[in-house]
Image (cartoon, rainbow, N blue to C red):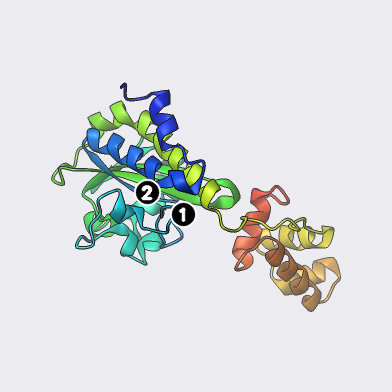
Amino acid sequence: MSLLSQENIDAVRVSSPAEIRPAAKALHKIAMDLGYRAAPAHDIADKRTPVDGDGKVLAIEVFGWGDDERVWWRNSRIALDSPLTTACRFEGQPFWANAQGFHTRDPNAYLQSIDIANFEQRAMTRACIAVPVHLPFGQIGAVSFNPLDKERTDLSEDFLRLSDALGLYARTFIATYVQVMGSTQALPPESRLSKREVECLRWAAIGKTDLEISMIMSRSRATVRFHIHNAATKLNAVNRSQTVFKAAQLGYISLHN
């Protein structure tokens, strides 16, 4: 079987909870055959890791990350502290990373500004090929492919040879897993924002406080808070920043004013 094939793509695609484990096994086999172990995350902001249809952790059950190992999915600070998860927020294409920095096919100045001090400890690997998976509503998943030879730190040749195929397989697995396993919709059906809610969020997006928005709109501060709170509820957001971000993702407001 060739590295990039329709058969492989179909094998890692998830279409029902029962197919999660077989798809994970297919992704695991592809990675292992290439000398790598996959580490999938459906949401880099969520310390939970993908599970099969019975709720069993795939990292242990399929991908071979044993309980006795220091693994990414047990670190509650990984979303904030790992340079790899930070890079996934700034890059949409596969990249590889080691203690010398981030390496991409096309330059990305944002990656060069990421702190890579204590890379091995914070990233929990000496080097890896990473695939960011940008999903609807601002969710970001990722799959890192870690060399079975833990002493390897230069993945440049493998990256050029493998990254396109690994990128397609990783995106297919994570995107279809999220679609199948979303126990609740990312947004409730009644998520349409009102004119006033959108107006408040537009001002909030450029840094205006509730008091400033109330003065601009000639409304009370309580009214502004009410509109922003309603928008947050509709968008299933946990705070003001996420409300603004989700509204932008849905095209209600722009973040480029």
Residue 29 coordinates in the image, percent (x, y): 28, 37
Q: Amino acid at mark 1?
A: Asp
Against 192, residue 159 (above or below) is: above
Task: State which quarter of the image contains the N terminus.
Answer: top left
From the viewer's side, name the closer residue of 188 and 45.
188
Residue on which disc 2 sits: 40
28 sits to left or right of 14: left
Residue 135 coordinates in the image, percent (x, y): 54, 46
- Outermost residue on the right side: it is 218
**Do we see residue 223 in this rendering?**
yes
> Residue at coordinates 16% horizontally, 46% vertically from top-left?
150
Residue on which disc 1 sits: 43
Would you identify the image quadrant in which residue 239 lies? Answer: bottom right
How far is disc 1 from disc 2 in space, using C-alphas? 9 Å
248 sits to left or right of 55: right
Total tally of numbered discs in the picture: 2
Would you say the residues marked 1 and 2 are in contact, meaning their CB atoms lie under 8 Å apart?
no
From the viewer's side, name the closer residue of 70 and 130.
70
Would you identify the image quadrant in which residue 155 lies? Answer: top left
Residue 84 coordinates in the image, percent (x, y): 35, 51
Q: Amino acid at mark 2?
A: Pro
> Residue at coordinates 41% horizontally, 52% vertically from top-left?
52
> Residue at coordinates 21% horizontally, 49% vertically from top-left?
126
Badge number at residue 105: none
Residue 53 coordinates in the image, percent (x, y): 45, 53
**Do we see residue 100 in this rendering?**
no
Q: Residues within 10 Å of mark 1 (few under 14, many from 20)?
A: many
Q: Circle 2 sits in a helix, a strand or a loop, which is it?
A: strand
Q: Circle 1 sits in a helix, a strand or a loop, which is it?
A: loop
> Residue at coordinates 21% horizontally, 36% vertically from top-left?
35
- Outermost residue on the top side: it is 2
Against 237, residue 92 (above or below) is: above
